[in-house]
Image: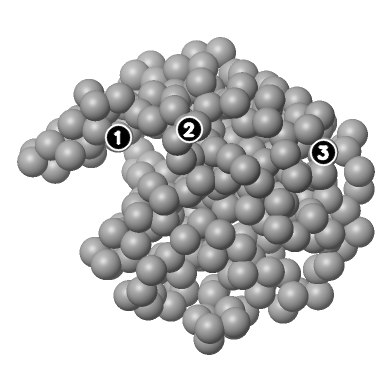
Amino acid sequence: MPYATAPDGVKLLYQVTGAGPPLVLLQGQANDHRWWGPVRADFDAAHRCVTFDYRGTGGSDKPDEPYSTRGFVADVLAVLDELGVERAHVYGTSMGGRVAQWLAADQPGRVGALVLGCTSPGGAHGIERSNDVRKSLAQADRAAAGQALRELMYTPAWLATHPGPHVTLGDPGLPAHARRRHLAASAAHDSWDALPSITAPTLVVHGTDDLLNPAANAPLLAGRIPGAELRLIEGARHAYFEEFREVASPAVLDFLARAAPSSG
């Protein structure tokens, strides 16, 4: 299995599929590359898709030390350097969108076009989920909490015909310490001051019915990043990219085709 080595020595398992201009896909908090499994083929047809398992997840090392969304950028760059990819398009969803914000702000020469999905600027300016949502996820009945998470990710109609297993609910092999580290990294994210420095062509995508990461964050991001486009997907929840893939994937692919090409 192919590994890249981060600057601090952490081994990162990565995956490459498809052919064409390189596209980095960054998944949500506490998830490994399998997050992208249901839709990866949509992008393989036009792009060389690069994913990796975040530290703490999947086949990557799992150090028990602080993680941060900005720190994950070094891991992304380690994978790209291992592959000899100087510049790539980047599509980040949820916490992956937070990582992608820092990647584009801190390493503008490495990012062709940027897509930010179901994500937030965090900090004082980000719109947090409601207390009701927090309580539903923290309830002592773990089966009920799991069902609450599924209903935040997908609509009831979709769940009725797609009973799972669902690959967006977290890496089942994630150690408890890594789960805590991922949660802390996402919670501490605050890119507000850096967003105006992003120069990559940017598309912000969000489901209108997303309560896990409230949809009100999308116009905040789009208004803060110069020239950003905004695409809201009506009726979609947090996992818009899977349930509404027939809308979402073409929208992203069209944007990438119109944006400045990555050099590979």
Mark nearer the viewer, 3 or 1? 3
Q: Which mark is residue 149?
A: 1
Does dot 1 land on a helix, a strand or a loop? helix
Image disc number at residue 126 = 2
How far from the left and from the top, in percent, is residue 107? 75, 60
Q: Look at the numbered disc 2 and give the secondary structure of its residue.
A: loop
Work out whether residue 38 can be spotted.
no
Furthest-left residue in this view: 140
- The kind of residue on which mark 3 rests is Pro
| Quadrant of the image occupied by residue 178 | bottom left
Looking at the image, residue 83 lies above or below residue 44: below
Nearer the camera: disc 2 or disc 3: 2
Across and down, in percent, residue 40 comes to 63, 47
In the image, what residue occupies the spot 27% across and 67% down? 177
Query: Mark 1: which amino acid?
Result: Leu
Name the one closer to the observer, 39 or 107. Answer: 107
Disc 2/disc 3 C-alpha distance (Å): 22 Å
Q: Nearer the viewer, residue 165 or 27?
A: 27
What residue is drawn where x is 54% and y is 65%?
Answer: 71
Of pointers 1 and 2, the one earlier in the residue sequence:
2
Q: Which residue is mark 3?
A: 201
Indicate the quadrant containing the N terminus: top left, top right, bottom left or bottom right.
Answer: bottom right
Q: For label 2, count other residues whose C-alpha is less than 10 Å away and answer few (under 14), some (14-19) or many (20+).
A: many
The answer to whether 67 appears left or right of 219 in the picture is left
Q: Percent from the top left, x then y, of residue 212?
A: 38, 30
Residue at disc 3, secondary structure: loop
